[in-house]
């Protein structure tokens, strides 16, 4: 990996912002900053501006037509409630697997085939790497079976959304669960949006702390996290290159982030593809105009650029989506260095 990145060291970064290749059991690497070619102008800047205008317009429209949006959500939720798949205790596990199976091979694969998208590569050697169907099926089973076992024996409790606790008590009388107790009405558009955003922000903070420990504690890096960094050039399938501990931690952290805000089952359903898209985008190796890090101003989000840097240099960029905790950590590190 070190030689591969040395040969193709190239970044779309501000001048003098170097990075290192990951190497060793603690994530430390060899500085390759001098081998970096710099492009100061982002090729999709006009597209980013247009997308920001579109996003702002949609936001204004949702606020102005909130009643209409609420009716649309209610109609959509009624359709979901009539679906046996949505009622099933296995819905979220299977839906997450399907979302990942659709996003991974289609979106990064399609982008890789379009030569006009090459200008958005973080590194010119970035390339989509196909995996066998056997591996995809094996990974899917490896992910779903443990979670489906939990789904089978645990009562799904969605608190704060109008479900009578008596229903949960009645479900506990059965050792095997087949259906979920679901609320009768959909959330408001406002509730869905704020629960979705708040859950992503909390997950980001939780995983920052976990990620920092995985990188800094040698034993954890070697036996838990190192597998995720065991690759050549970063590509989308690295998203799912996780140890069992990491996989369980990711799922539990996301679930906790949703539960503390009493997120509605429909919010949780929307959360799944959004969350998976953001994870896959981070590992894609492309700096796309539609990325959250491009749409949000002031460098609030890190996106695939920062995550690419993390995979080359395990010493920084621990947040999966945003940047404020990484910035705070950098400030603390600078203060400590000055005090020495």
Image (cartoon, grey):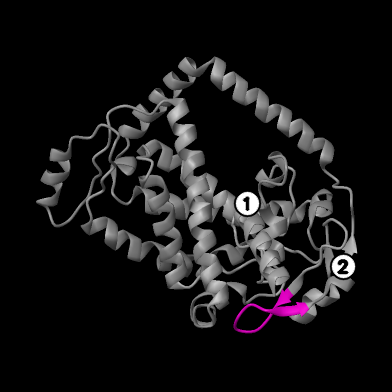
Label placed on residue 324:
1
In the rendered image, residue 257, in percent from the top left (x then y), is placed at 42, 49
Task: From the top left corner, tell me how far across and down residue 264 is, in percent.
Answer: 36, 37
Q: Is residue 329 visible?
A: yes
What residue did someone put label 2 on? 36
Corner quadrant of residue 311:
bottom right
Q: In this picture, which residue range is highlighted in magenta? A: 21-30
With 270 as the anchor, is 186 left or right in this view? left
Q: Looking at the image, can residue 129 be seen?
A: no
Identified at 64% across, 63% down, the residue is 332
Question: How would you rate the neighbour count of disc 1 (Cα within 10 Å): few for under 14, some for 14-19, many for 20 or more?
Answer: some
In the figure, 247 relative to 73: above or below?
below
Secondary structure category for the residue under label 1: helix
Q: Residue at x 55, y 67 (%)?
A: 212
**Dot label at residue 23:** none
Task: State the count of labels.
Answer: 2
Quarter of the image for the C terminus: give it. bottom right
Q: Is residue 23 magenta?
A: yes
From this view, report whether residue 148 is shown above or below residue 273. Answer: below
Left or right: residue 111 versus residue 45 is: left
CB under 8 Å between callouts 1 and 2? no
| Distance between the alpha carbons at the discs numbered 1 and 2 | 25 Å
Give the camera-side residue of 118 and 195. 195
Q: Earlier in the sequence, mark 1 or mark 2?
A: 2
């Amino acid at each position: 990996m070190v030689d591969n990145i040395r040969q193709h060291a190239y970044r779309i970064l501000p001048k003098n912002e170097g990075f290192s290749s990951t190497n060793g059991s603690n994530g430390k690497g060899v500085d390759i900053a001098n081998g970096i070619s710099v492009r100061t102008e982002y090729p999709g800047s006009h597209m980013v501006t247009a997308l920001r205008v579109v996003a702002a317009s949609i936001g204004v429209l949702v606020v102005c037509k909130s009643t209409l949006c609420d009716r649309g959500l209610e109609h959509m939720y009624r359709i979901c409630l009539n679906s046996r798949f949505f009622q099933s205790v296995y819905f979220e596990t299977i839906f997450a697997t399907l979302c990942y199976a659709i996003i991974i091979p289609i979106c990064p694969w399609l982008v890789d085939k379009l030569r006009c998208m090459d200008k958005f590569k973080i590194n010119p050697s970035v390339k989509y790497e196909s995996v066998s169907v056997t591996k995809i099926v094996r990974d899917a089973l490896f992910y779903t079976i443990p979670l489906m076992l939990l789904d089978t024996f645990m009562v799904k409790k969605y608190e704060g959304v109008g479900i009578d606790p008596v229903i949960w008590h009645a479900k506990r009388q059965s050792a095997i669960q087949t259906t979920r107790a679901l609320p009768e009405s959909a959330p408001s558009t406002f509730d869905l949006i704020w629960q979705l955003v708040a859950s992503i922000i909390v997950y980001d903070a939780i995983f920052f702390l976990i990620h920092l420990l995985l990188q800094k504690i040698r034993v954890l890096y070697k036996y838990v996290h190192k597998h995720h960094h065991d690759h050549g050039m970063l590509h989308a399938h690295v998203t799912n290159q996780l140890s069992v501990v990491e996989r369980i931690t990711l799922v539990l952290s996301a679930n906790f982030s949703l539960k503390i805000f009493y997120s509605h089952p429909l919010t949780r359903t929307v959360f799944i593809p959004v969350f998976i898209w953001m994870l896959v985008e981070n590992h894609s190796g492309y700096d796309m105009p539609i990325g959250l890090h491009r749409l949000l101003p002031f460098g609030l989000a890190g996106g695939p650029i920062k995550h690419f840097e993390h995979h080359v240099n395990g010493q920084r960029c621990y947040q999966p989506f945003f940047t404020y905790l990484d910035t705070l950590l950098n400030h603390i590190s600078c203060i400590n260095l000055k005090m020495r």
